[in-house]
Image (cartoon, rainbow, N blue to C red):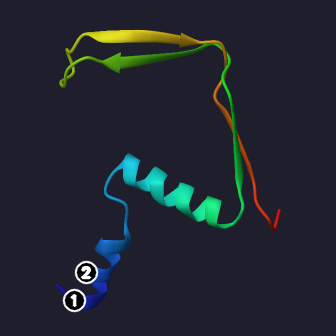
Amino acid sequence: MSEQAVESQASEPQSWTQLGKEMWTYLTGRGAVINYKLIDMTVEVPRDTGPGAPRAVWKLDGTLQITTSDDDH
């Protein structure tokens, strides 16, 4: 494997959690603000792993609306 390929793999997020953390770090470093608005949103939270796992259903009064701003915009 080339050195460039190793560097590329090391800098790419490997999960949604890691991607979220990297985005948050980037945005907060720019003085960003992230606003959330929830309208009639349902979230299913699995109790166990696997597709057939029982789920808790959370209903939130809102639509997920995400807006951002930073020092430059």
Percent position of residue 1, x then y: 16, 84
User: Which residue corresponds to the image point at 19% horizontal and 25% vertical from the top-left?
Assistant: 49
User: Which residue corresponds to the image point at 22% horizontal and 89% vertical from the top-left?
Assistant: 2
Q: Please name the amino acid that badge 1 sits on.
A: Ser
Mark 2–mark 1 CB contact (< 8 Å): yes
Q: Please name the amino acid that badge 2 sits on.
A: Val
User: Which residue corresponds to the image point at 21% horizontal and 21% vertical from the top-left?
Assistant: 51
Quick one: SS at disc 1? loop
Q: Nearer the viewer, residue 26 or 53?
A: 26
Percent position of residue 61, x then y: 65, 12
User: Which residue corresponds to the image point at 58% horizontal and 64% vertical from the top-left?
Assistant: 26
Residue that label 2 marks: 6
Quick one: SS at disc 2? helix
Q: CA distance from mark 2 to mark 1?
A: 6 Å
Residue that label 1 marks: 2
Percent position of residue 34, x then y: 69, 46
Q: Quadrant of residue 3?
A: bottom left
